[in-house]
Image (cartoon, coloured by chain):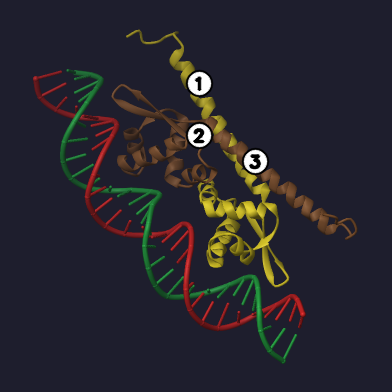
Chain colours: A yellow, B brown, C green, D red
DNA sequence: AGCAAATGCAACCCACAGGTTGCAGTCACT
DNA sequence: AGTGACTGCAACCTGTGGGTTGCATTTGCT
């Protein structure tokens, strides 16, 4: 599936305008032009954002009549969430272990 | 909770160097200088990244002796993961409802 | 058929993020 | 006490991401 690297997906989510777009698309399919009518940016700008989002799998496009409608892919966001959660847990685990070592009075250096 | 807005946190995670840093810090506390010795960027650059990460709560700093050590905060990543998951689910739910409407014979499409 | 509307592509602009170097100050070791 | 190491701050450089305008083309609707 060539899942994009974490930083890339996060970068795609690291823009306010893109979140605006995603929010709208989360409510239902919309075309770039339709989004441009709602949001305070040009259609072309929207188009670029949609391309970015599509490359990381956060939206999918579908030709509907003469327009191309996009829709937010919740599953991708879910997949990202799981990845982040996994990493976060590993951080906590290691940190906990380190703290235990530090606090264990067993064979510690007594200064 | 002063939780930074989603786009901001994601933006912080949207940089490869920052992930490098986080990965190292996930393994244990390190100072900016120590990170600079390991990573191919200057200490000052690392410092800026650490500041960004600290502002969104992804790392915490602690004065240890004459150096400042940083550590990755897994809980923050977990919190972000939960937020994203929640949003992703809502997208899927709405999309499912829309598809159901579309496929249902146009009989009970009352508002 | 004809017009309005949607898309695709390209050139262009500008702010800023990521990076660098340099310097000054401070604090821990020997 | 002296020295090396770590930090903080500032100035500076550059690529590019987000945005715009303009134009050509396609395509649905009446």
Chain letter of the residue carrying label 3: B
**In the rendered view, would you say A103 is above or below B24?**
above
> Horizontal and vertical percent for residue A85?
59, 35
**Mark 1 residue crowding within 10 angstroms, few (<14) / some (14–19) / many (20+):** few
**Mark 2 residue crowding within 10 angstroms, few (<14) / some (14–19) / many (20+):** few
Chain letter of the residue carrying label 2: B
Are the numbered discs 2 and 3 placed on the same chain, yes or no? yes
Label 3 sits on a secondary structure element that is: helix
> Horizontal and vertical percent for residue D22?
48, 78
Q: Which residue is mark 2?
A: B2
Q: Which residue is mark 1?
A: A97
Label 1 sits on a secondary structure element that is: helix
Looking at the image, is mark 2 or mark 3 nearer the viewer?
Answer: 2
**In the rendered view, would you say C23 is above or below A61?**
above
Q: Which residue is mark 3?
A: B85
Are the numbered discs 1 and 2 placed on the same chain, yes or no? no
Cα–Cα gap, marks 3 and 1: 28 Å
Cα–Cα gap, marks 2 and 3: 20 Å
First reached walking from the N terminus: tag 2 or tag 3: 2
Looking at the image, is mark 1 or mark 2 nearer the viewer?
Answer: 2
* Residue situated in front as seen by the camera: B94 or B68: B94
Q: Is residue B70 visible?
A: yes
Quarter occupied by residue C22: top left
Quarter occupied by residue B80: top right
Which of the numbered marks, if any, corresponds to residue A8?
A: none
**In the rendered view, would you say B56 is above or below C7?**
above
Cα–Cα gap, marks 1 and 2: 29 Å
């Amino acid at each position: 599936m060539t899942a994009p690297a974490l930083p890339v997906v996060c970068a795609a989510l690291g823009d306010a305008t893109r979140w605006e777009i995603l929010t709208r698309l989360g409510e239902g399919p919309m075309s770039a032009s339709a989004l441009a009518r709602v949001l305070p940016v040009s259609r072309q700008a929207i188009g670029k954002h949609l391309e970015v989002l599509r490359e990381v799998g956060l939206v999918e496009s579908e030709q509907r009549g003469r327009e191309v409608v996009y829709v937010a892919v919740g599953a991708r966001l879910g997949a990202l969430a799981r990845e982040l959660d996994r990493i976060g847990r590993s951080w906590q685990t290691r940190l906990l272990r380190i703290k235990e070592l530090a606090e264990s009075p067993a064979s510690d250096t007594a200064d």
